[in-house]
């Protein structure tokens, strides 16, 4: 028994890329490294953190190539963990995944609502200031809309999804070019790459600097979600790991360039 295989490489790559979000999620989370360690934290926490994230992503891609099933990590655990520990590890993995999926969806949609309300605030020339209730209500509506979209048949979703990567990557490159061309003044290289500003309240700059890793760990996440789509993907043992590796590598490189440009 298996699902209908409606996903090709482009739609699978888009699906994997959409989990990171790239431009939107970087915009939402850029404040964390900026608070914790200033410009240096924004740039170097991403650079170091994305290398660690890529190690996980490529490892998950290799595992997915061996076990391309909709069971995802639960199925993998039964083959790579000693039998007596399988129930415990599956239980831990399930609760970690459930918690991450729940909080991840809520935080993503709350971030989207915040950006949307900020746009409305800007277009009103700041005569309107969204309340916490307004932002929360919009976040709930976004979550409902996502639930409705994900209820569509996979044949429809695969056609919609494949265009996401084009729009997102294109918009990210356009933003990078626009910022470089239109910015009237750049920060110095010494400030951009070496200035540490601890705004957390913690006495230790090194300890505060570590909070900068919240950004990259939140953006480059949920690597195995694509593996759970395996039985809806053509040639899953090859295309699924390729999509995971390619999407996360794209996020790591383009994300770091965007962060450097924003910090400049």
Image (tube, helix red, strand yellow):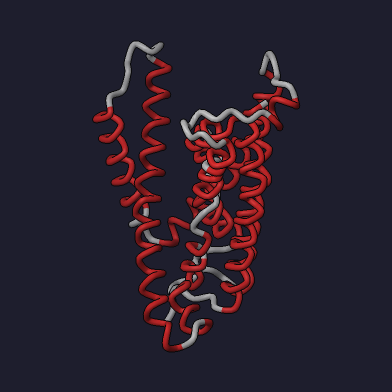
Q: Is residue 192 left or right of residue 200?
A: right
User: Residue 96 sits in which quadrant?
Assistant: bottom left
Image point (41%, 44%), residue name:
108
Do we see residue 184 in this rendering? Answer: yes
Image point (36%, 34%), residue name:
113
Q: Is residue 74 left or right of residue 57?
A: left
Q: Quadrant of the C terminus?
A: top right
Instruction: Tally the numbered discs.
Output: 0
Q: Position of residue 89 (x, y in %)?
A: 42, 76
Q: Is residue 196 above or below residue 107?
A: above
What is the residue that sits farthest to the right in this orientation?
Answer: 189
User: Residue 235 sits in which quadrant?
Assistant: bottom right
Q: Is residue 239 left or right of residue 143?
A: right
Q: Position of residue 125 (x, y in %)?
A: 41, 11
Do we see residue 175 in this rendering? Answer: no
Q: Quadrant of the N terminus?
A: bottom left
Q: Is residue 77 above or below residue 160?
A: below
What is the residue that sits farthest to the front in this orientation?
Answer: 203
Q: Is residue 157 left or right of residue 11?
A: left
User: Residue 62 sits in which quadrant?
Assistant: bottom right
Q: Position of residue 200 (x, y in %)?
A: 48, 32
Q: Position of residue 129 (x, y in %)?
A: 32, 18
């Amino acid at each position: 028994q298996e699902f209908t295989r409606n996903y090709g490489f482009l739609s699978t790559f888009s699906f994997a890329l959409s989990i990171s979000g790239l431009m939107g999620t970087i915009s939402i989370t850029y404040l964390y490294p900026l608070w914790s360690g200033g410009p240096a934290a924004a740039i170097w926490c991403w650079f170091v953190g994305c290398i660690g994230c890529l190690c996980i992503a490529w490892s998950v891609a290799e595992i997915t190539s061996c076990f391309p099933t909709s069971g995802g990590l639960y199925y993998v655990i039964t083959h790579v963990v000693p039998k007596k520990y399988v129930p415990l590890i599956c239980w831990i993995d399930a609760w970690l995944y459930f918690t991450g999926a729940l909080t991840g969806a809520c935080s993503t949609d709350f971030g989207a609502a915040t950006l949307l309300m900020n746009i409305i605030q800007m277009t009103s020339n700041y005569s309107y200031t969204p309340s916490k209730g307004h932002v929360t209500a919009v976040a709930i509506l976004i979550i409902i809309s996502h639930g409705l979209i994900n209820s569509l048949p996979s044949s429809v979703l695969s056609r919609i999804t494949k265009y996401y990567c084009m729009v997102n990557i294109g918009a990210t490159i356009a933003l990078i070019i626009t910022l470089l061309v239109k910015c009237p003044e750049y920060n110095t290289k010494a400030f951009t790459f070496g200035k540490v500003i601890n705004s957390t309240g913690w006495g230790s700059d090194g300890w505060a600097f570590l909070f900068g890793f919240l950004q990259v760990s939140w953006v480059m996440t949920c690597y195995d979600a694509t593996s759970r789509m395996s039985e809806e993907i053509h040639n899953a043992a090859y295309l699924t790991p390729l999509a995971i590796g390619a999407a996360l590598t794209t996020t790591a490189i383009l994300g770091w360039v965007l962060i450097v440009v924003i910090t400049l």
